[in-house]
Amino acid sequence: MNKSKILIVDDELNIRETIEELLTLNNYETKTANNGQDALDVLDNWTPDLIICDIMMPVMDGHDFQKIVYSDKLLSTIPFIFLTAKTADNLMRQCFNEGADDFLTKPFKATELLQTIEFKIEKFKKLINSSNLYQGDQRILSHEINTPLHGILGSVNILMDDALNLKKQDITYFYEGIKISGERLNRTMQNIALFEKIKKNQFDVSKNACSEIKNTFEDVLNKISFQLKKEQNRVVSELTTAELAVSKNNLTLILFELLDNALKFSPKNKKVVIEGSIFSNDYYEINIFDYGVGFKAEELKLIDATVQFNRDKIEQQGLGLGLYLSKAIIKKSKGIISVLSREDIGTKVSILLPIHKK
C-alpha cells in the first residue's frame, strides 16, 4: 500500500525534524522545506496528500505560499494545516478564510497532530476519488468524444452498405478516416486518464527512463503527418542527437502536444520550428517556435488544465490538457519549461530535460 505523502514547511529546524520523525515512525512519506519558496520547488517534482505549514517564515510566508498553491487547479484541493505560535483570533479567522483546513497552535501534542492528519487525508482522498474525470467544459468533452466516434461509425456504415460500389481509393479514404478518428479518440481518452492519475497523485516517472530525442521526434513527425494531414511539411527541425532521461512514451506526448499546439495556433502558411541541442553536461534544451496568434500577457498567467483560448475564433481540437500534461511530465522528470509569447507575433516554448547518464 502506498504511503500518504506529507510536506512539512517550517523555518525552525528542530520543529521540522521533530514532525518529520513523528510522521516517519507512523508510516508517512515526508519532505521538508524551510519557507514557502523552497516548498514550491519541492512541489515541482512531488505532490503531497497534505501540507503542514508554519505561517511566519522568511522569504515567503505561509499565507503567500498557500495562495500560490491554491491557484493551481490540481493542487487546490490539498489540505493545509497551519502551525503558529500566535493565538490571536483574527489570525485564526484569516487562515480559515483563506482556505486552511485546520489550525494548530505551537506547542501541540503529537496525538493531536496525528489525529488531525489522519482525518484530513481521508477526507482529501474521498474528494479526489469522487470528482469528475474531466474538470473542464462538459460540452467540449462531449464534442471531443462524439466527433471522432461519428467519423468512425459513419465510415463503417458506408463501407458496410455500399462496399461493392466503391472504388479502391474511396475505400482507402474511409479506412484512413476511421484510423484518424480512432487515433484522435484514443488520444483524448489517454490524456483524460493521465490527467486523472496526476489529479489523484498516482503519476510518477521511472528513474531509469531513457529515450533518444531524434528517433522519438521522427516518430512524432510521422504521427503528425498521419493525424494532421501532411502538417509535417510545416515543421522545420534541427536536433542534435542525445539520450534523455525521459521515457519514449512521455517524450512522445510532450513533443506531439506542443507541436500540435504550435500548428493549431499558426496560420497554414507559417512554419513551426523545433531546435534541440546539448545545453550543459546535465541538460538538453528544446525550443519550439511558432509565428501565430500568440497569447496576451494576462492569458499566459491563466494557463492551466482544461483552459483554452479563442476556441470560438480558432478551430481547435482537444480538451486543453496538452500543455498542462506536458508541464507535469517535464516537472516530474526534473526538467524545466517556460513559455514566452506576444500577441499576433508568436510563441516560444523552451524546455530543459535531463540527459540520461549511462
Image (cartoon, helix red, strand yellow):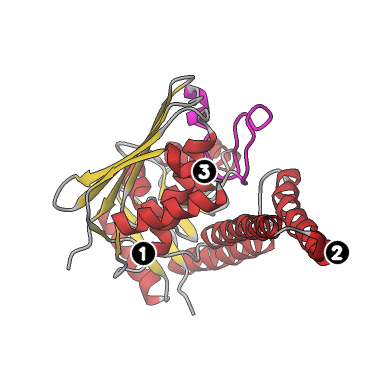
Horizontal and vertical percent position of residue 307: 59, 39
Bounds of the magenta segment: 297-319
| Badge 2 vs badge 1, beta-carbon distance below 8 Å | no
The residue drawn where x is 71% and y is 49% is 141
Q: Residue furthest bottom?
A: 1
The answer to whether marks 2 and 3 mark residues whose Cβ atoms lie closer than 8 Å is no
Report the residue marked by disc 3.
72
Which residue is drawn at the image coordinates 64% and 64% (left, top)?
A: 129
Q: Residue at x 60, y 67 (%)?
A: 122
Kindly indicate the quadrant of the structure image that contains residue 118.
bottom right
Label 2 sits on a secondary structure element that is helix
Q: Earlier in the sequence, mark 2 or mark 1?
A: 2
Residue for badge 1: 247
Can you say whether 141 is above or below 93 in the image? below
Q: Residue at x 58, y 39 (%)?
A: 93
Indicate which disc residue 161 carries: 2
Find residue 181 and report its image quarter: bottom right
Q: Amino acid at mark 2?
A: Asp
Percent x, y of residue 219: 41, 58
Does any portion of residue 300 appear in the rendered image?
yes
